[in-house]
Image: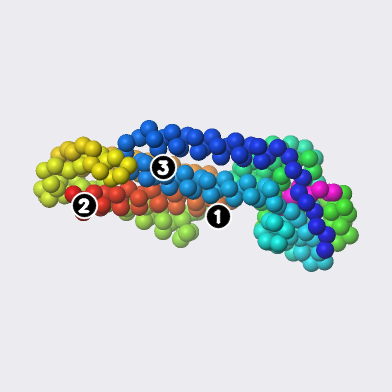
């Protein structure tokens, strides 16, 4: 088995800088808002962002590649296999020593490195494990392409040729027949999000019309969920309706984002609708919590 360490460039500085910037922005927003809902949502966002950033920092530092008789593996810390590519599945490869030109689908990426999924010019949808653009080898399989940046790329290229894998270009095309509404993984969370937003919007309004809301209802809270100010049932219903409208706008934005990215990678497009679902669930839970507590 042959092992190849990844070429290290300046990507780590970029990822760390982005992580610090995101933390500073979110922390500033947390300490500058008096809204319990927004504070809680921002704290959850901070946790998710830091897990996301830590994963890619870890990946950048410890990714390497191994090749044996039957497989080419992309590993983390030498022993954890991230991707296992059968040699027989590799149709051809392409080797490039130039700036990375593409569209990031997920992960991190600049013209000098890329981690995650990207649409690479003249390559197509690619899972990138490229820590430097100094020497990049793209491995094409039937379903997707893999990008790696091994030290001693000459040796790896020789090994690929010995296994009958040719250096060749290829064509790719975007998905023009996008029917996400026919896919249960997209359609079900979309419908659930829509129903939750309708409940979020109409529930307090119906309660107000029925006269079942208290005469005074808290309409703002501090980060510890202590009421800051009270308003009438009408004011509470109006505020919740505003939250509902904002959630509907977010759902539509995520819907169009899903369709845009589905042209390149349908599986990656689902995450946008799940973001909308998670946020609508959060606001509905907060509404029920307020109504049940006060």
The span shown in magenta is 146-153
User: For the point 64% across and 50% down, which residue is it?
Assistant: 58
Q: Is residue 70 visible?
A: yes
Give the image location of residue 76, x and y in percent: 68, 56
Residue sitting nearer the eye, 181 or 166: 166
The image quadrant of residue 33 is top left
Mark 1–mark 3 contact, CB under 8 Å? no
| Residue at image mark 3 | 42
User: For the point 18% across and 49% down, which residue is it?
Assistant: 294
Tell me which label, 3 or 2, sits earlier in the chain.
3
Could you tell me how far apart the alpha carbons at marks 3 and 2 are, in whole angstroms?
A: 23 Å
Circle 2 residues within 10 Å: few <14, some 14–19, many ≥20: few
Quarter that holds the N terminus: bottom right
Residue sitting nearer the eye, 212 or 293: 293
Circle 1 residues within 10 Å: few <14, some 14–19, many ≥20: few
Q: Considering the numbered disc 3 on the image, is that residue within a helix, a strand or a loop? A: helix
How many numbered dots are placed on residues in this image? 3
* Position of 286 relative to 134 (above/below): below
Could you tell me how far apart the alpha carbons at marks 1 and 3 are, in whole angstroms?
A: 26 Å
Horizontal placement of 86 versus 242: left or right? right
The dot on residue 293 is 2
Q: Is residue 57 magenta?
A: no
Give the image location of residue 282, x and y in percent: 35, 50
User: For the point 52% across and 46% down, which residue is it?
Assistant: 50
Horizontal placement of 121 versus 53: left or right? right
User: For the point 62% across and 43% down, which residue is it?
Assistant: 108
Could you tell me how far apart the alpha carbons at marks 1 and 2 are, in whole angstroms?
A: 40 Å
The dot on residue 267 is 1
Tell me which label, 1 or 2, sits earlier in the chain.
1
Q: State which mark lies toward you, 1 or 3.
A: 3
Q: Is residue 102 visible?
A: no
């Amino acid at each position: 088995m042959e092992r190849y360490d990844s070429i290290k460039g300046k990507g780590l500085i970029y990822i760390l800088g982005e992580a610090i910037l995101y933390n500073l922005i979110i922390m500033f927003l947390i300490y500058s808002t008096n809204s319990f809902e927004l504070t809680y949502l921002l704290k959850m966002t901070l946790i998710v962002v830091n897990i996301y950033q830590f994963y890619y920092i870890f990946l950048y530092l410890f990714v390497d590649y191994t090749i044996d008789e039957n497989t080419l593996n992309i590993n983390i810390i030498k022993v954890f296999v991230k991707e296992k590519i059968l040699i027989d599945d590799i149709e051809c490869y392409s080797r490039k020593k130039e700036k990375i030109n593409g569209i990031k689908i997920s992960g991190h990426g600049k013209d000098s490195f890329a981690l995650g999924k990207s649409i690479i010019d003249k390559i197509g949808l690619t899972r990138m494990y490229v820590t430097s653009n100094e020497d990049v080898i793209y491995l094409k399989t039937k379903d997707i392409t893999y990008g790696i940046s091994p030290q001693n790329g000459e040796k790896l290229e020789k090994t690929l040729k010995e296994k009958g894998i040719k250096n060749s270009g290829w064509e790719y095309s975007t998905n023009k027949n996008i029917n996400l509404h026919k896919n249960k993984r997209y359609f079900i969370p979309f419908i659930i999000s829509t129903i939750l937003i309708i409940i979020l919007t109409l529930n307090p309004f119906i309660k107000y019309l029925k006269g079942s809301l208290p005469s005074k209802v808290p309409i703002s809270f501090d980060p510890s969920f202590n009421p800051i100010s009270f308003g009438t049932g009408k004011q509470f219903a109006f505020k919740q309706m505003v939250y509902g409208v904002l959630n509907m706008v977010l759902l539509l934005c995520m819907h169009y984002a899903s369709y845009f990215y589905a042209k390149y990678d349908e599986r990656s497009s689902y995450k946008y609708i799940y973001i909308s679902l998670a946020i609508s669930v959060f606001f509905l839970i907060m509404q029920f919590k307020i109504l049940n507590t006060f």
